[in-house]
Image: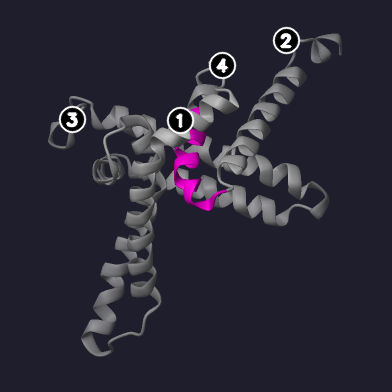
Amino acid sequence: MTHLLAVDGPLYRVLAGWTAFLRAGAVWLLLCLPVVTAPAATVVLLRTMHTIAAGAPTPTLRESWRATRRAFGPALRLAALLAAGTFVTVTALLGPSPGGAWGAVLPLVIVPAAAMWAMVSTWALAVLEQRHDGAWNAMRYAYLRVVRRPELALAAVLACAAVVAVGLALPAAVWFPYWLTAPALCALAVTVTCRRAGVSVRAPSAPTIEEDPHG
């Protein structure tokens, strides 16, 4: 029992980890308040969660704000690309069927394309955070990573969906603390899987889709 409550005990580590996630989520929400900064704030959140996973000190609020300002332009351009692509994808999925032979063939094309888009979209901001070389390259390398490691991309999508599903199932009394940590939980799943896929893409066994470190 003494070890459980010690400063270096498991209970302390759990509480410290939860506090770090709570703080990261609160900072993200604060940086999102002018909604137009939300993409850049998400890039900063992804960087923060990578820092926490690596065991390094988390950035201060001032450092996070400065990082948000630096990421603002590229993140906003990437968000516009993602919004346009999502609009086209959803329209193709939910739009009227042309009927006939095309009505039977189109779902075989649209559904896999929509699944690919969902996985690429999940990783795009994480690639931008890691590479710092523009919106188009972020989309390009997110796609390459999904092609190379689709199981990791699917794990990221399912992890984010699970975070949302758990939040909806929880009683209202714990909604606030849970939803405040939910963005950090999703960001952790996304950045860990995306970076692991990035290592795989650069592996010698996959020279045809090797990432260019210079963009």
Closer mark to the observer between disc 4 and disc 3: 4
Q: CA distance from mark 2 to mark 3?
A: 42 Å
- Residue name at image x 38 percent, y 59 percent: 83
In this figure, which residue is indicated by the disc labeled 1?
Answer: 67
Q: Amino acid at mark 3?
A: Asp
Earlier residue among tags 2 and 3:
2
In this figure, which residue is indicated by the disc labeled 3?
Answer: 212
Is residue 136 in view from this perspective? yes
Query: Could you tell me if the residues under marks 4 and 3 are in contact, i.e. CB atoms within 8 Å?
Result: no
In this figure, which residue is indicated by the disc labeled 2?
Answer: 8
* Most frequent secondary structure within the magenta stretch: helix
Dot 2 falls on a residue whose secondary structure is loop
Neighbourhood count class around disc 4 (C-alpha, 10 Å): few under 14, some 14–19, many 20 upward:
few
Magenta segment boundaries in residue numbering: 34-48
Query: Could you tell me if the residues under marks 2 and 1 are in contact, i.e. CB atoms within 8 Å?
Result: no
Neighbourhood count class around disc 3 (C-alpha, 10 Å): few under 14, some 14–19, many 20 upward:
few
Earlier residue among tags 3 and 1:
1
| Residue 88 falls left or right of residue 157 | left
Earlier residue among tags 4 and 3:
4
Label drawn at residue 148: none
Q: Amino acid at mark 1?
A: Ala
In this figure, which residue is indicated by the disc labeled 4?
Answer: 57
Dot 1 falls on a residue whose secondary structure is helix
Earlier residue among tags 2 and 1:
2
- 212 falls in the magenta region: no
Specify the quadrant that holds the C terminus: top left
Relative to 178, residue 114 above or below: below
Q: Amino acid at mark 4?
A: Pro
